[in-house]
Amino acid sequence: MQGLITVFWKELADDFTRWRFVILFALVFGVAVFAIYMDAQYIREAVTETRFVFLQLYTASGQALPLFIFFFTFFMPIIGVTLGFDAINGEKSSGTLSRLLSQPIYRDAVINGKFLAGVITIAIMLVSVVLLVAGVGLRMIGIPPSSEEAVRLIAFLFVSIIYGAFWLGLAVLFSVFFRRVATSALASIAVWLLFIFMFAFPFFAQLSGQLGLTIMRISPITLFWEVATVLLIPGARTLGQMAQASAIPSSALSAGQSLLIIWPHLISLLALTTICFAISYVKFMREEIRST
């Protein structure tokens, strides 16, 4: 446990001091601020609604898609990949991994500590962005969130962290399997582009019945998009419905009913994350690491 804590704090400190993370963090905050000010007029119009006004800070948009959900769906993979694509092979190429393992630190503590530090870093970033939007929006509309809105936001944050952990686990997996850092980064980006293609390409949506939607849900991007839609837009009654932010009927679902709807998707994201990390864990524990 002591070795795990040591690696965890070292990686957490490295994550927050690397220039690539500082730049990415600033970019995420900049986009979040830009998004809320771009949609300021629609957010002010939301005050005229009687229900779920605070949630509309995250969904009101003058565009065809809710900008905040779109931002989280497509930026989270970049954050996860950035934190994990050189987690193991970067240490190997620099020769620090063999020296690290020569210390009284177990091998499993290395990969566990790196992954845990990445997840905590993602969680801190996501909580900061959500609180930033909440603070700016609260100043603009002057209406605090209701208890049900708070539950929905907490659930959204939890699922977002799992979604980011999947991409982190996928990047760590490629970092274990490939010797070169560039190769693991390109492999992670290739998978991201493939899943975007499965989400955005209209061919699958045009397939008959449940088949097209099932194929699209192979992509974690589709899974997260639907979960975010159901949680942040109470008017979305089915997972296949890409509801507009303004479409919140008076008979909107309760938070409990929405959580029941997204439960299978949450389990799927957890399973995918666990599989990616488990494979990388087994491979890392079995491979030979030579001193350089």
Image: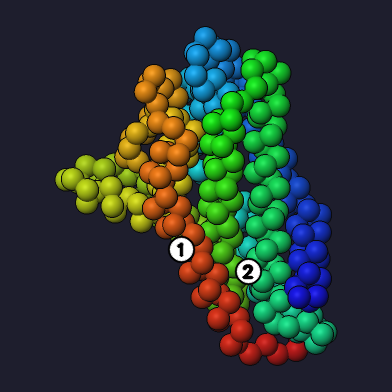
Tell me the residue at 70%/32% (across/down): 132
Residue 120: x and y in percent read: 69, 55
Answer yes or no: is residue 54 visible: yes
Residue 288 x/y as whole percent: 63, 90
Residue that label 2 marks: 181
Residue at 49% over, 13% down: 49
Res 160 visible? no
Between tags 1 and 2, which lies in front?
1
Residue sitting at 49 percent across and 19 percent down? 51
Question: Residue 271 bears which disc, if any?
Answer: 1
Give whichever of 238, 7 is nearer the camera: 238
- The x, y position of residue 172, in whole percent, is 59, 68
Identity, as a three-letter code, of the amino acid under mark 1: Ala
Which is nearer the N-term, disc 1 or disc 2? 2
Q: Is residue 248 left or right of residue 96?
A: left
Quadrant of the rendered image containing residue 88: bottom right
Q: Secondary structure at mark 1?
A: helix
In terms of depth relative to the viewer, which is nearer, 271 or 197? Answer: 271
Tell me: residue 13, above or below residue 94. above
